[in-house]
Image (cartoon, rainbow, N blue to C red):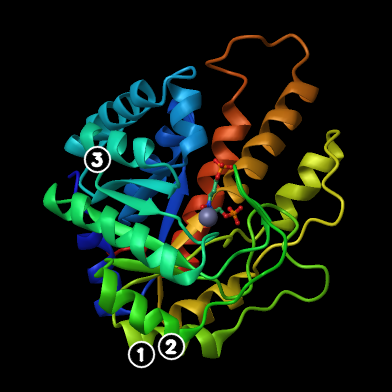
Amino acid sequence: PYVDTKVILENADKHGYGVPALNINNLEFLHYIIEAGIKMNSPVIIETSQGAMKYAGNGDFRKGAEIFVKMVRTFADEANIPVALHLDHGKSFEYIVAAIKAGYSSVMIDASEHPFEENMKITKEIVKIAHAAGVSVEAELGQLAGIEDEAVAAENVLVDPEEAKIFVEETDVDFLAPAVGTSHGAFKFKGAAKIDYDRIKKVKEYVKRPLVLHGASSVVPEFVEIAEKHGADFGGAKGVPAEILKEAVKCGINKVNTDTDLRIAFVAGLREFLNGNPKEFDPRKYFKLAREYTIKVITDRMEVLGSAGKA
Ligand SMILES: O=C(COP(=O)(O)O)N(O)CCCOP(=O)(O)O
Ligand SMILES: [Zn+2]
């Protein structure tokens, strides 16, 4: 069934497991996520960024939002696992309202590049509108380094747990994404991978609601190697290893944003297949390996996070 993201995350919070929030830009990745969720009997949170809305609507983000809601609901209504659709990194008022109007389960207002007071003010306004429409809200505190679609946060600005307490009390946001050392994309750490567990625990103690980890892809070496064997250049790629994700879930993370891992698995399979099948040009055939690898990376993640079997 199609559910509110809050329902999925409150159950995860209550039972101490993580749920993968998986980004899509097209039909193929949606297919693979639903297949993986059914196979593992896991709840799934589908999420689309503003860039994805624009892409799906061929430049018209309102059209994109409608297309995504119709596609996801078609799968969700007949799947025996809970499925939610979330707007990821909503930065513009128009995109957030378009997502709410189209029927998204939840929206993120990402005002994290603004100073604390401004972030709180903007978030409060969105929460008021979203809650009036029965839609739950995610916000971000602190800043991830790495490239986000519009804003490039140069440095990691880790969340201040005291600020998180005030922020949540003031805004009544449903789930919070604290910056704790990760970053978006495939190049997350120069040295050893590490995130600030104590900070997660402190924020959890204060806000007592589901927490979100952004930039949580593991950048799985197996698929990086396959992609590089077939012409990709991902030198220096490094993600968040599974054992760190498990610890983060223990500390209170419940929604685990994953996009890069799907992209790398897909492109590894696509490169391998195209290299090995020079005569193939049927789009119903040449995604075969891309599909297999993407489903694999999702089912593995559901095991790691503990959402497998929880539908
Ligand atoms: O936190 C993540 C993904 O983290 P990851 O890169 O570690 O998968 N996300 O919110 C996904 C952000 C995708 O945005 P865009 O479509 O603009 O590229
Ligand atoms: Zn993110």
Number of numbered discs on residues: 3
Q: Position of residue 146 (x, y in %)?
A: 69, 56
Element on which disc 3 rests? helix
Q: Which residue is mark 1?
A: 205
The quarter in which the N terminus is drawn is top left
Q: Which residue is mark 2?
A: 162
Callout 3 crowding tier (Cα within 10 Å): few <14, some 14–19, many ≥20 = many
Residue for point 32% across, 47% down: 38
Mark 3 and mark 2 residues within 8 Å of each other at the beta carbon: no
- Under mark 1, the amino acid is Glu
* Mark number displayed over residue 43: none
Mark 1 and mark 3 residues within 8 Å of each other at the beta carbon: no
Question: What's the distance in space between the residues labelled 3 and 2, CA to CA?
Answer: 30 Å
- Under mark 3, the amino acid is Ile
Asked if 17 appears above or below 114 in the picture, the reply is below
Q: Is residue 269 left or right of residue 55?
A: right
Q: Position of residue 159 (x, y in %)?
A: 53, 77
Sequence order check, earlier mark of 3 and 2: 3
Callout 2 crowding tier (Cα within 10 Å): few <14, some 14–19, many ≥20 = few
Element on which disc 1 rests? helix
The quarter in which the C terminus is drawn is bottom left
Q: Which residue is mark 3?
A: 100
